[in-house]
Image (cartoon, helix red, strand yellow):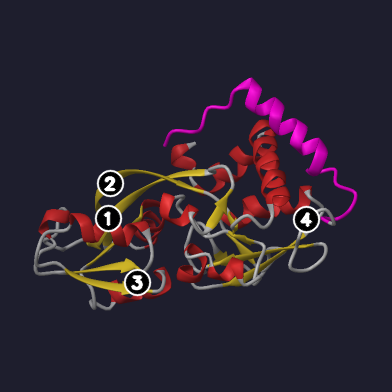
Amino acid sequence: MIRPIRTAVALAGAATLLAACGGESEGGGSEYELVAPGTLTACSDVPYPPFEVEDSEAPSGYSGFDIDLLQAIAENLELELVVQDTGFDALQSGTALAAGQCDIGASAITITPERQQNLDFTDPYYNSLQSLLVPADSDIESIDDLAGHTVGVQQGTTGQTYAEENAPEGTEFLALPSDGELWPALQAGQIDAILQDLPVNDQHQQDDDGYEIVEQYETDEQYGFALAKDLNPQLREAINAELAALRENGTYDEIYNSYFPENG
């Protein structure tokens, strides 16, 4: 995984933003348009390990790479983080944010030109690949072997798009709302494979050696936190400043390595 390169100019700009509206804020977020005063309300499609999972011991009741990173940002902005479990389609389409359900979407959301028509994104915070997960005894060795098989995808995602554009004729697609439905469907034999983000499939592979990733796909995807289009530029600038500060002080790497040690 290639980490973004930070230039001195970019860091200097981020430091200026941080001083203006970042971690030392005295107003508890009063300078931002928030759903609830003093609270950063995040919408996230849970579960999607290792990015978001329920966790009764975490301050917000949720953890994962996205949530831990956003928790650090919220604390630096002197805001309480509240997480709402929300369907991914309502997030990636922008409807949940436009309706004022939450301030920010944190759900491994790939930045795409289509989504940018309805959403504002922060700076990227994660680079991802797509992958194909199958039972270890499957005769599927690549995407080219999917003809005559059913592949599960998460509806509204870049994984669904990639599968539909690259799988051979004769492939059946089953689009489900989230990994919370895809993974049990694969275990139950209702589908023959899952094509979705590599880290999520890798988590399943680690948890159960009866399944394996047979192929990875370079798609040049980057995740960003999503905000309602053109409604809260101050909050986006503050979060970008905090992301830069967390990278600079090593907190980003600590969180990253706790979930992706093999890539650290």
* Label ID, residue 26: none
Q: Is residue 134 magenta?
A: no
Q: Earlier in the sequence, mark 2 or mark 1?
A: 1
Q: Give the spatial CA distance, label 2 vs label 1.
A: 9 Å
The three-letter amino acid code for the residue at tag 4 is Tyr
Q: Which residue is rendered at x = 36% and y = 69% of the image?
A: 155
Q: Which mark is residue 217?
A: 2
**Residue tagged 3:** 182
Residue 107 rendering spot, x and y as whole percentages? 52, 60
Which amino acid type is marked by label 2? Tyr
Examine the rendered structure and indicate whether residue 33 appears above or below residue 4: below
Q: CA distance from mark 3 to mark 2?
A: 19 Å
- Count neighbours of disc 3 (C-alpha within 10 A) and say few if under 14, some if 14 to 19, many if 20 or more: many
Q: Earlier in the sequence, mark 3 or mark 2?
A: 3
Question: Are the two marked residues, 4 and 2, in contact with CB atoms closer than 8 angstroms?
Answer: no
Residue under the image location 68 percent in, 63 percent down? 58
Q: Which residues are magenta?
A: 1-29
- Please name the residue that numbered disc 4 is placed on: 32
What residue do we see at 65% from left, 36% from top? 244
Q: Position of residue 190 (x, y in %)?
A: 24, 78
Give the residue at mark 1: 162
Q: Nearer the viewer, residue 68 or 93?
A: 93
